[in-house]
Structure formats: structure tokens, C-alpha cells
Image (cartoon, grey):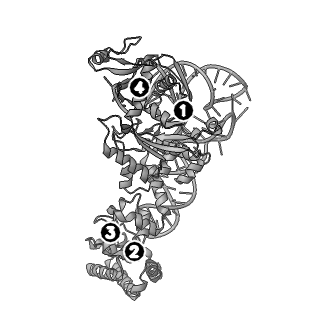
RNA sequence: GGCCCUAUCGUCUAAUGGUUAGGACAACGGGUUUUCAAUCCGUUAACCGGGGUUCGACUCCCCGUAGGGCUACCA
């Protein structure tokens, strides 16, 4: 790679997904590495939609790819769609036929060992195709991540490169595009490693030096098999829907398979561009671990200011914004520590959620008001009455969690924190799990707090 | 089956011939706390096996084993 940079040849990388399914993390990460590499070398990054398979390609999937890249901040310098480039491929098909490197074949390919007997009988029934005349030799290429990889292409036989003189397939179109687009570094998934020798063969037939290859290890599912669209890998956009932060997803994925020289784990996109090193990319596949993704997301959520948080969270709590904007301003602080992703908010604020008490007080039994199931209901009642008395002295305008805490604290300390604060919590929230009573009171407001306290006192009478 | 790739805690990984094999997630325990969470501190946990090479191997070589990928007129 250094030679190219030294010789002044501009680095050009590409991401070439096929729109045959939603974009998943594994594909995205390959694109991410590709893009970062281009950025590091002041090069160009190209997005190429490989939609030559008309049967399986769908517009919906292409749109999903575009949405994913935009959400996760991958910017490309050029965009191509293979379905719009058939004329270019035709030129190459003809060129290969004219130079004797490819031929029109109606028959089964000539293989040294007639190993594919079943397929052969099928093939004879099919229409004519274009086959590459395989020189059957050893091919060696130097992979940036794996070093020298050697293949014997003999057993590949005369493989198909086009369905007809008009319709090229994968092995050819990839090469044609990579040549035409001036790709210098092909950074792609390891699943393509065994496609590489036959592609190199075509480069040689064309008299063109192949680009530099870097085969990224695969992202694996829990069962250790490759993440694939067919097996229902989670689309990247699903994480958007669930309210993950793009920077968390990017950060996590970049560190799956790559690691800096030190123990640092948090990287922004720009910092990745500064620190990433293709040569340090892992050789083995990595299991996608959603728990660690969640941890990353929490790290980034905790960094958000209340304002930023509210902005990002608002799509997940629309009804709270329209009704009382006051409450929505009080919520961020509480929500931030409780959620992993924004989608958790609706559960938290829902009727049976931890913050469900804000909208309406759940029905609860009077025994719940007693701290540590203390049978002495009288005391709890006295504490509640005293708490009510104190809260009533606080002015509406200064009714915040801090002020309430200060007002109640000394009493709580002398009477026993549990004795005072537990009944207060339950009275205000009707729940055993909730934010602390001061925050809870703040969330529902002075008036409602007083109302609920009175209600609880009646319950104990 | 054939070809190719890979191999350190459960997971992601550090280590490039000499370390008490380090970090993070998870798990577990504890501090803090009125509950839960958050946070802080700590604990458990790994070099796939066998041969070499070497004064010395997680590190280099070979052989196994295991996992994965490819094996289409898909990409």
C-alpha cells in the first residue's frame, strides 16, 4: 500500500453491498473499515450497489443500505449501481472473447476430474453461457491482513463469467467496476477470499495488475456462523429503531476485530480515522455481542446533555412532550440513568413501568406503606403526616428535588431514614421501585404530591 | 468430500521469544443508598492438543483437533 501512496496513486476503496436484504452489522463494518482506510490516506470511497441479480435485488433493500450508511455516518465520494452499467460489462465480455480468454459454451465445462456429475447433466440442458478459459495455475496474492495466500485454480475449471454476451455476473462485473473505478484497495469480507484467485485470473487475462486485497474476518452470530441476511441477522436500522446512538454502534463495531495498542475503548469516528490500523485487524471472526453494544450505548447516553438527550428521546415519548412540556424537562436526568437505549423509555413511562406513577398513581395495598413490614402502622402514618406538613411549607415555585430533600432530610435522619422515606416513596409512587422520593415528588409536582400523601394517610386510618 | 482461512478468560481482545498472561463486557461479591438503577472497589475466569526449533515459547515450524468460509448461469 505504501508503494501506491509513494508513487502518487490516489487510494480508492469501495463498499459493494448487494441489495438482497437489509444491511447488517457485518457488512456495515466492512464498509466502515473501507471508508476509514480511504480517509486515512486522503483517498476516495465509493459506494457501489451490486444489483446484477435481478431476481433477488430489491429497491427497498437499496434504500435500507443508504439509510444505514447515512445514519452511521459513512459518506461516499461516488455512487454507482451495477444495473446501470451493463454496456461497460459488455465491452469486457467481448474483449475477453476476442482475446481468446473466454468462450461461448453450451456444453458442460471441461474438468480434469468429472467430479460434478449431477450438475453436469443439468448444465447440458441449459442455455449457452460465457466461460472463462482457465489457465489452471497457482495464484498467490498478498493479503494485507493474512499475508500470502496461495490457491491452485485448476479445480475451478472454466467458470462462468456471464449468462450471455449481454449479461455479466459477479466475478466479471466486480473486476470491471474495480478497474473502471480505479480501486486500489479491496477491503471486503473473508467470505470473498476464495473468490479472489479467479478474479485475479481475469485481471491477468486483461493484462491489468490486480489491486491490493484485505480480507476482513467475518462477524459471527451466537452460533459462530457468519452473520447473514438469509439467517436473519439484525439489520443495522433495527438499532436505529430501538434508539441506539449511531456513535455507539460505530464505536462498538470498529472495536470488534480491531484494537488499538493501548486499552482505550471509546473512539469517535474522527478518532477512529486517526487511530485505526488495518494491519492490526484481527484474523479470526468475532461474535457480535449485543450486551457490549448496550454498554457502549450507555456510555454515550451518559455523555449527552439534558437538551441533547431530550431531542433524541422525543420520538420515543411523543405524548409526554405535547401534554406537559414541564415534565419532559424534568425527565432527562432520571431517564438517562435508567435506560440502555431510547426504546426503553416507553416501558419505563408505561403503566406498569418504573416511572408509570407519574401519569397515574397505581393502586396499592396499605401494607406496602410500612417500612420493613413494620406492623406499627401508627408510626408510618405519623411520618407521612409530618412529611406532608413539611412539603406544604415549600413554595410551588421552588418545588424541586433538592429543595424537598433539604426540607425533609433532618427529620428523616432523626426519625430514621427508612421509616420516613419508604412510606413517602410508596405514597407518592405506589411502587416499591422508583426514583428517590424527592425526585418522585418533583416529577409529579407539589400539588399532586400533597394529594397523594393525603390519600395515603387516609389509607392508614 | 475438496480448497482456503482461523485458534488467549463465557464474549471482544493485549502480548510480536523472557509478563505474577494485561484490559473491557458479562458473571459474582462488597462499599454507597430509603427501593431499583447508576456509580465506586474487589473476585472468579484463558494461552486447543502433540511434537519440534531455542538457554527460554502464547508468540516461530510441523502434525493433529476444532470452528468458520467457499465449493451457483447469487453476490
Q: Which mark is residue A397?
A: none
| SS for dot 2 | helix
Left or right of B43? Residue A232 is left
Q: Position of residue A126 (x, y in %)?
A: 28, 20
Give the residue at mark 1. A211
Which marked residue is nearer to the observer: mark 4 or mark 2? Answer: 4
Marks 2 and 1 belong to one chain: yes
Which chain letter matches label 2? A
The image shows residue A20, relative to residue A268, as above or below, that is above
Which chain letter matches label 1? A
Q: Position of residue A98 (x, y in %)?
A: 43, 20
Give the residue at mark 2. A437
| Mark 2 Cα-neighbour bin, 10 Å: few <14, some 14–19, many ≥20 | many
| Marks 2 and 1 in Cβ contact (< 8 Å) | no
Q: Nearer the viewer, residue B13 or A69?
A: A69
Q: CA distance from mark 1 to mark 3?
A: 64 Å
Residue at 44 percent across and 56 percent down: it is A245
Residue at 38 percent across and 33 percent down: it is A87
Residue at 35 percent across and 28 percent down: it is A166
The answer to whether residue A295 of the structure is visible from this angle is: no
Which marked residue is nearer to the observer: mark 3 or mark 4? Answer: 4
Q: Which quarter of the rendered picture does the N terminus of chain A lie within?
A: top right
Q: Which comes sooner in the sequence, label 1 or label 3?
A: 1
Q: CA distance from mark 3 to mark 2?
A: 11 Å
Which marked residue is nearer to the observer: mark 2 or mark 1? Answer: 1
Amino acid at each position: 500500500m505504501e508503494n501506491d501512496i509513494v508513487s502518487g496513486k490516489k487510494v480508492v476503496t469501495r463498499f459493494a453491498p448487494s441489495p438482497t436484504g437489509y444491511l447488517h452489522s457485518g457488512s456495515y463494518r466492512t464498509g466502515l473499515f473501507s471508508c476509514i482506510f480511504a480517509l486515512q490516506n486522503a483517498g476516495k470511497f465509493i459506494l457501489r450497489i451490486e444489483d446484477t441479480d435481478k431476481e433477488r435485488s430489491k429497491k427497498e433493500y437499496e434504500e435500507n443500505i443508504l439509510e444505514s450508511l447515512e445514519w452511521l455516518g459513512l459518506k461516499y465520494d461516488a455512487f454507482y449501481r451495477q444495473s446501470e452499467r451493463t454496456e461497460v460489462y459488455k465491452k469486457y465480455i467481448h474483449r475477453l472473447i476476442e482475446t481468446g480468454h473466454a468462450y461461448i459454451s453450451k456444453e458442460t465445462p471441461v474438468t480434469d476430474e468429472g467430479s460434478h456429475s449431477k450438475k453436469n447433466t443439468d448444465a447440458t440442458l441449459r442455455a449457452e453461457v460465457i466461460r472463462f478459459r482457465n489457465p489452471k495455475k497457482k495464484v498467490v496474492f498478498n493479503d494485507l491482513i493474512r499475508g500470502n495466500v496461495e490457491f491452485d485454480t485448476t479445480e475451478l475449471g472454466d467458470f462462468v463469467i456471464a449468462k450471455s454476451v449481454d449479461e455479466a455476473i459477479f466475478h466479471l462485473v466486480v473486476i470491471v467496476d474495480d478497474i473502471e473505478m480505479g480501486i486500489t484497495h479491496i477491503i471486503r469480507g473473508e467470505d470473498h477470499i476464495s473468490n479472489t484467485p479467479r478474479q485475479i485470473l481475469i485481471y491477468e487475462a486483461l493484462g491489468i495488475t490486480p489491486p491490493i486485497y484485505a480480507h476482513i474476518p467475518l462477524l459471527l452470530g451466537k452460533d459462530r456462523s457468519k452473520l447473514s441476511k438469509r439467517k436473519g441477522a439484525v439489520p443495522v436500522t433495527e438499532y436505529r429503531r430501538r434508539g441506539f446512538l449511531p456513535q455507539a454502534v460505530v464505536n462498538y463495531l470498529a472495536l470488534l476485530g480491531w484494537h488499538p495498542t493501548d486499552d482505550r475503548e471509546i473512539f469517535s469516528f474522527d478518532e477512529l480515522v486517526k487511530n485505526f490500523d488495518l494491519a492490526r485487524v484481527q484474523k479470526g471472526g468475532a461474535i457480535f455481542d449485543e450486551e457490549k453494544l448496550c454498554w457502549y450505548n450507555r456510555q454515550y447516553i451518559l455523555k449527552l446533555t439534558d437538551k441533547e438527550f431530550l431531542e433524541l428521546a422525543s420520538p420515543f415519548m411523543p405524548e409526554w412532550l405535547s401534554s406537559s412540556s414541564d415534565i419532559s424537562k424534568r425527565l432527562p436526568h432520571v431517564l438517562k440513568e435508567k435506560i440502555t437505549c431510547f426504546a426503553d423509555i416507553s416501558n419505563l413511562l408505561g403503566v406498569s413501568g418504573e416511572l408509570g406513577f407519574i401519569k397515574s398513581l397505581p393502586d396499592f395495598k396499605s401494607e406496602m406503606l410500612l417500612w420493613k413490614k413494620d406492623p406499627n402502622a401508627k408510626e408510618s402514618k405519623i411520618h407521612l403526616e409530618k412529611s406532608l406538613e413539611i412539603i406544604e411549607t415549600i413554595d410551588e415555585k421552588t418545588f424541586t428535588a433538592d429543595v424537598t430533600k433539604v426540607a425533609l432530610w433532618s427529620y428523616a435522619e432523626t426519625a430514621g431514614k427508612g421509616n420516613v422515606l419508604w412510606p413517602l416513596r410508596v405514597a407518592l409512587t405506589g411502587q416499591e421501585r422508583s426514583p428517590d422520593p424527592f425526585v418522585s415528588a418533583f416529577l409529579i409536582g407539589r400539588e399532586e404530591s400533597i394529594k397523594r400523601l393525603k390519600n395515603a394517610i387516609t389509607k392508614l386510618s
